[in-house]
Amino acid sequence: MAGLQPSEEVDERQLELARQAGDTYREAAEYMISEVAETGDTTTEGDYLVGFAQEEAEGMYHPADGGLEWTDPGEENCHLEVIVADAEGGRFLPELAVRATLEGEGETVGPVAVPFIWHPGLYHYGTNLELPGEETYDLMVEVEAPSFPRHDEENGDRYAEDVSATFRASTSRPDRTERHIRFFVRFRADSVLFRADSVL
């Protein structure tokens, strides 16, 4: 991916402001992963910075009857967050179609949609999941290349291909029912997989 350059569409000041926004998003993502979430990691593949974070299931507002309705997680016990940003500039990439499937020994959860979630500290894709039993799960997330238009003939030739990235995280919580989870985040299509190990 060629670096962003001033063009008829964007000047150096705009690029500087975009870099500042990207630096802020990356800092917020790193804080979420290292200080807030139970486990998580990031890697770079092609045009994308890809990351994940895993927490306890969380309540959220959902649109309902022209307003918003708060919904508690119920039986769900895992909140999966997926971060997808520009690898060079660090800004969050919106409007991606994300699906997730968890596969354990004799147990499969999904595929389920992983939609965009508004968060006061970090925009991300996410969903609550119910993980049955004390097993090791493989979490497979599929994301299609974005369908939105790209401005700028000089800089806009990016995000044209699906991307694959893999994360593994073993989670053991002594103060709760013991559960081990191995996360695989997979952005479909190319053959290169990145691996990162995290232990809670």
Image (cartoon, rainbow, N blue to C red):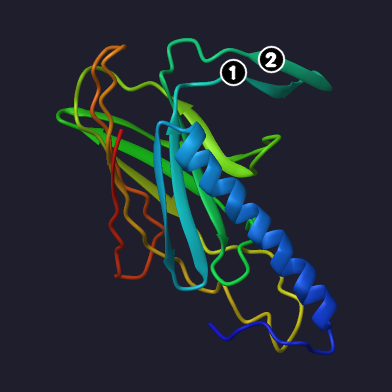
Q: Position of residue 77 (x, y in %)?
A: 41, 18
Disc number at residue 16? none
Picture layout, residue 32 above or below residue 157: above
Camera-nearest residue between 181 and 88: 88
Picture layout, residue 87 above or below residue 8: above
Q: Do the residues bearing badges 2 and 1 touch, measured as CB atoms within 8 Å?
A: yes
Badge 2: how crowded within 10 Å, few (<14), some, or many (20+)?
Answer: few
- Visible residue check, residue 81: no
Disc 1 target residue: 59
* Amino acid at dot 1: Gly
Q: Is residue 7 left or right of residue 108?
A: right
Disc 2 target residue: 70
Q: Residue furthest left?
A: 105
Residue drawn at the location 32% of the way across and 22% of the way down: 131
C-alpha gap between disc 2 and disc 1: 7 Å
Mark 1, secondary structure of its residue = loop
Residue drawn at the location 47% of the way across and 41% of the way down: 33
Q: Position of residue 174 (x, y in %)?
A: 26, 16
Camera-nearest residue between 13 and 129: 13
Mark 2, secondary structure of its residue = strand
Residue drawn at the location 59% of the way across and 18% of the way down: 59
Badge 1: how crowded within 10 Å, few (<14), some, or many (20+)?
Answer: few
Camera-nearest residue between 20 and 10: 20
